[in-house]
Each structure stands twice: as structure tokens, then as C-alpha cells.
Image (cartoon, rainbow, N blue to C red):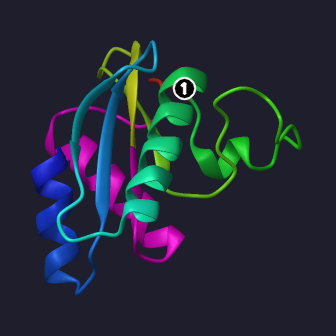
Amino acid sequence: MRNHCLAHAERAGHIVAVAVFDHSGELVSFAKDRAKPGTAAVAQWKGRSAAVYLNSTLETGSWNVPTAPMIATIEGGVPLFTRDGIGIGGVGVSGAPSAFDAECATRAAEAAGLAVSPAGR
């Protein structure tokens, strides 16, 4: 997933950081290419939030609870589900416009055979 997103971003002319987490919020995979340290931290913030809450960061940003632990409020983090709808983690991307970050994360999840929403939702 990480490499798929990095390649997609490079083709689009963006330098991004990508962070993949398991459902407990533990970092599984990370790459920042040439992204700045702040960009890398934001990718991890987005990915951990999506993994823990099993909701996109676009959605958690609308919850109006910015002080909740590990919650990200900027688009670019998506949850990861098996095709059977079981939540298994999240991926966060930062460095490009937020909508592109989310698209990159979604494409990476789909390339790995995963979904970004539970089945039937």
C-alpha cells in the first residue's frame, strides 16, 4: 500500500508521507520519501485516527470533538476493512492537497484488496 501511494503521488507531482496502522493504532508501515518531518507526523496522525476510529478523517473532522484522543480532523486518513467488512486498520497520507491525500490512501487500500468502508455501508 505504502509504495503504491508513493508511486501514485509521484506521478501526480506530489511528495507525500504514507503511514499504515493496525486497528490498535500501532504503526505497521511508513515512508516519507522526501517529505518534511511535519508532513510525516501529519500522515501518522491521520492514519492512526482512521485505524482507531475506523472512520475517515474527513468524517471524524465533522464530529466536533477535536480533543478526543488520537482523532484527526483533516482529510487524508482512511480506515481499512477486509472485503467482509472487518476493520483492520487505517492509512494516512499527507503532503498534497487533502482530497488527493485521501484519494491516494483509498487507491492504495483498493490495490491491496481492501476496502475503506465496511461492506454494505
Q: Quadrant of residue 69?
A: top right
99 on left or right of 61: left
Q: Give the residue type that dot 1 points to.
A: Leu
Q: Quadrant of residue 88?
A: top left
99 over 59 or under it: above or below: below
Q: Position of residue 21 (x, y in %)?
A: 35, 28
What residue lies at 38% left-to-right and 61% top-to-bottom?
37
What residue lies at 56% left-to-right and 34% top-to-bottom?
49
13 on left or right of 58: left
Return the residue at label 1.
54
Region of the chain picked out in magenta, as a range: 92-117
102 over 95 or under it: above or below: above
Point out the image quarter for the N terminus.
top left
What residue lies at 30% left-to-right and 20% top-to-bottom?
82
Q: What secondary structure is found at the residue carrying circle 1?
A: loop
Q: Position of residue 85 (x, y in %)?
A: 41, 17
User: Outermost residue toward the right?
Assistant: 64
Q: Position of residue 17 (x, y in %)?
A: 30, 59
